[in-house]
Image: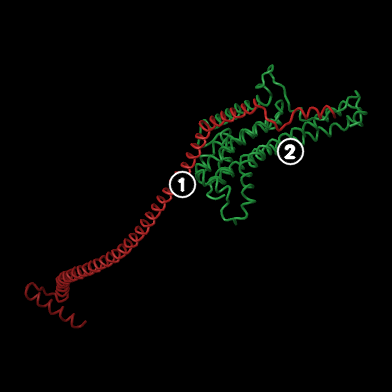
Amino acid sequence: MPLLRFLSQDGEGFVPPSTSDFNLPPVFGDNPYTTKPILLVFLSVIAVSVFFILASRKAAILPSKLQFAGESIYGFVRNDIARDNIGHEFMRFVPYLFTLFTFVLTNNIFGIVPLLQFPAMSHVSFPYVLAIFTFIVFHYVGIRKQGIGKYLKDIMFMPGVPKAAYILLTPLELATFFIVRPLTLSLRLFANMFAGHLLLLVFILGGDHLLKGVIGLKLISPFAFAFGIGLTFFEFMVQCLQAYIFTLLTALYIAGALADEH
Amino acid sequence: MHVVNLAAETTNPLIPHTAELIVGAIAFTLLFLVLRSKVVPMFEKAFTARTQAIQGGMERAEIAQQEAQRALAQYTEQLSKAREESQSLREEARAQGVAIVEELRAKAQEEATRITAAAHASIEAERQQAITSLRNEVGAIAVELASKIVGESLDDQARQSRIVDRFLDDLEKSK
């Protein structure tokens, strides 16, 4: 840091990007409902709705390119995530899982879309909301399927385990089902998006700062940008992966709640 | 660095914002309703239609194949039948041909025999005729010749004829 400060022309120190960079002020006046992430979330709802309505509108046997694209995503969620994990009752959960996947994916990818360039899921509120929905869904499904008594009993007293083990297992299982699952689900998504965006900020802003420096630093600057671009591709992968993981885990939790024994 | 730390303290990224929680819930619900009512049924419809189309196509292909096999069997049967028929026809024709040839040959033989017989008869008749006429003629010539030689006229018809007959008998005997 002192070296950088010494070398930079204007003498200003480089302020590395921090959590404060995620605090974006409202776009319109003081209205807290017009911040960038909120607008992006609404944009994602419109974009996803429009895209899939257009893609599915004709429901043709021989799909157009657009329909094929939409069907590929839908088929992936329907077959690879829902059907393969949940089993014969999967169709009930396809709309939810499909919404989850497209919603998370779109908001993640906003992180690398030019001009938008902010992953809404790096604001922890959105992953929280989604995790709460998933939490409600899989518990509700389990209770409806097995009755509240049996459902809770199966969670607290895992069948086929020696009684002494319950001292250890019961609190662990309760924590798993009611705290760890929703928390890890949301924090995993949030942290990945948060860290990814921060990483991109470091390299892009760093490269920009280096460009303002003396000649030696100017020469280093392209490397920072190149790294930033490389990381953008890497981020794309992470964004898709996180959307997949969130949806997959939700499907697994639902499958677990539907199964007779946990 | 101090500034940074202060900033980090003021904004703990793990604390949710009320506005974002509300918006997130509304937005997600909205998207869920849209996708569930508009998109999922349409895609399912397309999937079902496609499955049915493929199944229908396969069934149609199966039916067509059965049809083709039936037609093939029919044609094969017809062909073998036709072959048998032609074989029997050929046999029959050959037999008929043989019969016809036999018949013709017999007829020709008969005809030939008849013609030969007729020829024999006519030759015989002509010969008889020639003999008769010759006999008369030769008789006349001989008598004339004899009368010329002898100088004696044999006017008497009966005598003349007797002489001629005798002469001819002598001729035949001397042969």
Is A161 rendered above or below residue A38?
below
* Chain letter for the part of the structure drawn in green: A
Chain identity of mark 2? A
Q: Residue furthest right?
A: A6
| Mark drawn on residue B137 | none
Q: What is the x, y in percent for residue A6?
A: 93, 28
Among the 4 quarters of the image, the one containing residue B91: bottom left
Q: What is the x, y in percent for residue A5?
A: 90, 28
Q: What is the x, y in percent for residue A2?
A: 91, 31
Q: CA distance from mark 2 to mark 1?
A: 45 Å
Q: Nearer the viewer, residue B147 or B115?
A: B115
Determine whether, in the image, residue A203 is placed left or right of residue B71.
Answer: right
Picture residue at 69% right of the left edge, 39% below the top? A188
Question: Mark 1 = which residue?
Answer: B58
| Mark drawn on residue A234 | 2
Q: Residue furthest top?
A: A29
Q: Amino acid at mark 1?
A: Met
Q: Nearer the viewer, residue B122 or A144?
A: A144
- Say what secondary structure mark 1 lies in: helix
* Chain letter for the part of the structure drawn in red: B
Among the 4 quarters of the image, the one containing residue A120: top right
Determine whether, in the image, residue A220 is placed left or right of residue B126.
Answer: right
Picture residue at 14% right of the left edge, 76% below the top? B150
Determine whether, in the image, residue B148 is placed left or right of residue A93.
Answer: left
Q: What is the x, y in percent for residue A165?
A: 63, 54
